[in-house]
Amino acid sequence: MLTESEPHYRQPLLKTPFHERARALSQVDSFIPWAGYTTVDVFSFVEQEYFAIRNASTLYDLTPMVKYRIDGRDALRYLNRLMTRDIGKLKVGRVAYSVWCNDAGHLIDDGTVFRLGDTEYRLCTGERQLDWLLDSALGFDLQIDEVTEETAALAVQGPTSCAVLKNMGLGGIERLKPFELAHFALPAAIASDAQIMVSRTGFTGDLGYELWMRPEDAEAVWDALMEAGRYCAIRPIGSRALNMARIEAGFVLPNVDFVSGERTLRAGTERSPIELGLGWLVDLNKGHFTGRRALLEEQRRGPRRQLVGLDIEGNKPAHNALLYADKAGRRQIGSVSSATWSPTCKRNIALAMVDVPYIETGSTLWAEIYLNRELVWERRMARTHVVERPFFAPERRRLSPPADY
Amino acid sequence: MVSGGSGRHDAIIVGAGHNGLVAACYLARAGLDVLVLERNPYIGGAAVSRRLYDGFTYSNCSYVCSLLRTEIIRELNLPGYGLQIIPYEGGCTMMRDGGHLALYHNHDALRREIARHSRRDAESYERYLRDMLRQCRFIKPLLLREPPDPTSFKPRDIRELLYLGKHFHRLGEQRMYDTVRFWTMSCADFLDEYFESEIVKAHLAGSSIIGTALGPRSPGTAYVLLHHYMGNIDGAVGAWGFARGGMGAVTQALAASFQASGGSIRSGAPVERILVRNGRACGVVLESGEELLARIVVSNLDVRRTFLDIMNANDLPEEFVSQVRNFKIRGSSGKLNIALDGLPHFPAIPHGSPSIRGDLHVTDSIEMLERAYDDWKEGRWSRAPYIDMLMPSQIDPTLTPAGKHYMSVFVQYCPYKLADGEWDAARRQAFGRTVIDTIAEHSPDFKDLILHAEIRTPWDLENEVGLTEGNIFQGELTFDQLLFNRPIPGYAQYRAPVRGMYMCGSSTHPGGGVMGAPGANAAGAILRDLGRAH
């Protein structure tokens, strides 16, 4: 069982409530640290886990996502000052993806805001930032608590995910629309009178749900899902497979595609939401919010660089590749932050930060890729095109009610 | 060995401390005939390992290493001459109520540790680290550069000022403001901008006052914090470590490197006076009366000792002498080196925590630290002193017999001059007792384990090591005495006001902490003056 008694100086990483289940199913013993927890990188092999996302159903433990409860009379005013998006439009029972910035308009983080009640919100992010949230809360009547350890979370993603949840007994789940949340009674087989919260959200760009529950219900929910998904080819996945799917979906990842503007050491390495292609999340007309003045100025001036999607010739993923305007590699104009071979699109894709004017769709760039030929390394300048994101966006992700597969 | 008297040396270096030896190494490597003179029968200055109790090696003065510039270690091939620097992990402050705060290397262990005291501080710590690292990035390239003279129009000064200006502007607008604030504010004010927990602030504040006759609320102490943070071990910024075999290993390796380049060292050869003829330094006279001639003379001693003790004031500009007299170099710290029969038990430190192998402290609030400083101002040692205590024998097997331990205890505050009379044996013992009692409050078996203790007051440090008033940095690291104002405005470029005479001690930029940079920079200035490439 959980060995919480081990002190942090012996075991710095916490175990999630799903750890024992994951440990039992891990074939290759590949665990990685994520936000203070030990989590699975790969269960068996990456391609099979990846195809379960695009073909069947997957379980992914997202307990380490940092969760804050924001509750109080001024919660909405507070979130609207903190975030770039107009949170005033967010109704109870809905979820919004948003970003927030510092005064300089540099992105701090992205995350999802859940409106749980009139004055109660939950914020899910990749990084801990209680100090920023509390500093921003000065003068607002509200309470902010980190509830990461009090809430276990599982992502159920894939074309059969709705069917799995129906099988599990979550009646009416098919009526849940994208970015909606609802509470369900746990199936009778689980001896718990607690409810489970389900949101139609995810990080795969596919049909999928995220389940939020009490840690003490976690193992029973996992078992019920595995049972309910038996005929829907459900399987647990690690972070590696999820990362392939999120690149196909064109989502950015902190510390991979950008570093928080509150963490950078070197001037000029910060990124604005506009540069990251998240300008659609910035509502300059909603009234004052942190970073608005700087973002107004940036919008007027236009960004100097932007995150773009790339389609690269050949099949070798262009991890960390430098990008050039010319094949000779004389003029560097950017670099790749995320790269993968896309098994669904059969394309060699990447996310990259590229200087203006090379950001236009259709621009031709050159990626410097190193090829390992039985330990004899070669350099290839691969012809690369700027393409639209997302690389893969199936209709089923939005369909309501969703199909069974 | 050069016997002296017979011929003229290219350079004589007064003092075989680490900076004297670093300068000597670079000069010898450039082909100069260099003689280093040391007053004590052993070399090392304040980077010295001595065996004062059978089987035990003490780091008698400086005791940990971080700031020694990697460039120097590489260029002088110190690892080839036996220098090994081994990082240690974290440290711990024991609290009066039995609690503790430890710092761990692992990011998640550290976050959870700080969160035991304040969840918010655990996350603010990231912001604190970021800002310290930003300041480090700013100062690091300045360490091995001769500070430019802002009043000079020499091409080199203008070039260096432009570099400094450009470097400063690269910080970005907000950070330029931050840097100026940072260099002038107090450590307590600085830490208040990040943390709410008293114990977190107290633990971090320690390195803002080490070696400094200032309290945590004195302006200028935030910089001292940075001074202790800007080193690195193998790229880990802010990490500290032990020199295997004690800090004397640093100077032993330097001496070996120097001798391999053809240089010679004479220990037990105290210099009585630096000879100046026709406005030019031309050698030294030893206390024995022996005269040694050289084209240039380099002093590793602090500026007070150099210009007031072993030079004639009438060889120097009058205003310069006044400024040397006003140079702030106040003793504030003492040191205990203790041989222990075993590892003492500290009940506040959890069993199995690696923090016992790091730096241990017992000052659990800024207030307590400031009160300790108040005692110093009144001319007595702190009744509840700040201590920086380590037991390197847990990591370094060369220091003690198996199962025994060596404890190094840096103590602050301790005045150079006592309000109630001169330092004597009885007062030294009483000072030692205060420290031992302080440690014993946190370790019930500590006193029973003591086999031998070397107790050193600022007075002892001055008389044995030669540091004026026992100031470990050869002069306070306050903004009025840094960069182009260190040690004396107009004389920051290692050249004394007498031709052929140079300074290479920690009194010069960028200051103390066993960095070696003053010695390397001084050698650079000398070689430029001699028209040799550095």
Image: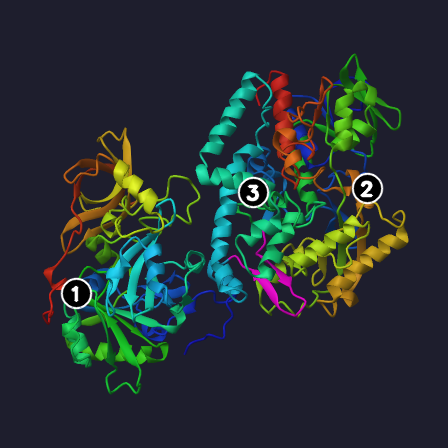
Distance between the alpha carbons at the discs numbered 3 and 1: 51 Å
Figure label count: 3
| B97 lies above or below A107 | below
Residue type for callout 1: Leu
Q: How far across and how far down the image is residue B106, in percent? A: 49, 58
Relative to A79, is A149 above or below?
A: below
Q: Residue B72, which numbered label?
A: none
Residue A381 in sight from this viewpoint: no
Mark 2 vs 3, N-terminal side: 3
Identify the secondary structure beneath mark 1.
loop
Chain letter of disc 3 in the image: B
Q: Which residue is mark 1?
A: A207
Q: Dot 2 lies on which element?
A: helix
In front of the other: B284 or A18: A18
Instruction: Residue lying at the far top in this picture: please name it.
Output: B278
* Cβ atoms at labels 2 and 3 below 8 Å apart: no
Q: Are marks 2 and 3 on the same chain?
A: yes
Position of residue A232 measured from the top left corner of the image (x, y, whole percent): 15, 73
**Does mark 1 fall on the same chain as mark 3?**
no
* Amino acid type, residue under disc 2 in the picture: Glu
Q: Indicate left or right for B397 with B173 as reference.
A: right
Q: Could you classify mark 3 by the number of other residues whose Cα lies within 10 Å: few (under 14), some (14-19), or many (20 or more)?
A: many
From the top left corner, tell me how far across and down residue A318 is, in percent: 25, 45
Mark 2 Cα within 10 Å, few/some/many (few <14, many 20+)?
some
Who is closer to the viewer here, B12 or A203? A203
Give the residue number, with chain letter if any, for mark 3. Answer: B182
Q: Which residues are magenta?
A: B87-105
Q: Chain of mark 2?
A: B
Q: Which residue is mark 2?
A: B464
Residue under the point 59% across and 63% down: B101
Of labels 3 and 1, the one closer to you = 3
Label 1 to label 2: alpha-carbon separation? 77 Å
